[in-house]
Image (cartoon, grey):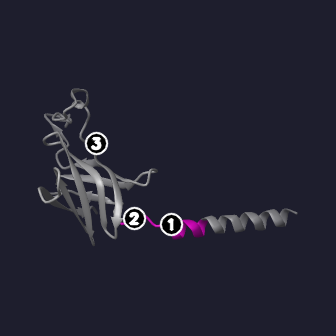
Amino acid sequence: MPRIILNSLFFLILLITKQQAFAQNDPLEHYWYNEGKSAKIHVYKAKDGKFYGKITWLKVPDRNGKPKMDEKNPNPKLRTEPIIGLMILKGFKKAGDGHYDGGTIYDPKNGKTYSCKMTLHNNELDVRGFIGVSMIGRTTTWTIAD
């Protein structure tokens, strides 16, 4: 009887390990440097199946010895939130191979949120923020962080 339990346990562990080996992260899920490498953003897939990104590092993390805050946020209650840890990408869905859309990007430099789409090219990510139609917007290129 103990041998059957041991063999069953071994088979179960092998099955779980194999499933994890085949489960791959989406190529968007990385740490990315923004253009100019002034910030590092962690992009991940949440339980809802959508992609989100938050700032995890700043080249200049403080001002006068105090952490940089989200001072330009249109919501006064959020102006005391630190920039590090701030969610700037929200709600992206995969729209095809290397294409992600349906999300928004928040710019803490001006406190504005824009519609956004992203396109992955090897180790670069084109991030296009726009108002209304994507033809009226701006694209920046992010690179995978080391």
- Name the amino acid, label 3: Leu
Residue type, label 1 = Ala
Q: Who comes first in sequence, dot 3 or dot 2?
A: 2
Q: Secondary structure at mark 1?
A: loop
Q: Which residue is mark 1?
A: 23
Q: Amino acid at mark 2?
A: Asp
Residue 3 percent coordinates (x, y): 83, 66
Cβ atoms at labels 3 and 2 below 8 Å apart: no
Q: Quadrant of the C terminus?
A: bottom left
Q: If you read the primary sequence from the N terminus, does the residue marked by circle 1 or circle 3 appear first?
A: 1
Report x, y in % for residue 74. Answer: 19, 33
The kind of secondary structure element at disc 3 is loop
Q: Residues in magenta?
A: 17-27
Q: Quadrant of residue 13?
A: bottom right
The disc label shown at residue 86, or none: 3
| Residue 21 visible in the shown view | yes
Q: As drawn, which residue projects farthest toward the top?
A: 77
Q: Nearer the viewer, residue 124 or 7?
A: 124
Calculate the distance from the C-alpha at mark 1 to the C-alpha at mark 3.
Answer: 28 Å
Q: Pick out the residue farthest to the right.
A: 1
Left or right, 45 with reference to 146: right
Image coords of residue 85 (percent x, y): 30, 42
* Mark 2, secondary structure of its residue: loop
User: Which quadrant would residue 8 be assigned to in this image?
Assistant: bottom right
Which residue is found at the position 14% from the left and 43% from the top? 109
Q: Residue 14 location in percent, x, y?
A: 65, 69
Residue 25 vs residue 14, the one in the foreground: 25
The residue carrying mark 2 is: 26
Residue occupying image coordinates x 53% and y 69%: 21
Image side of residue 20 versus residue 79, left or right: right
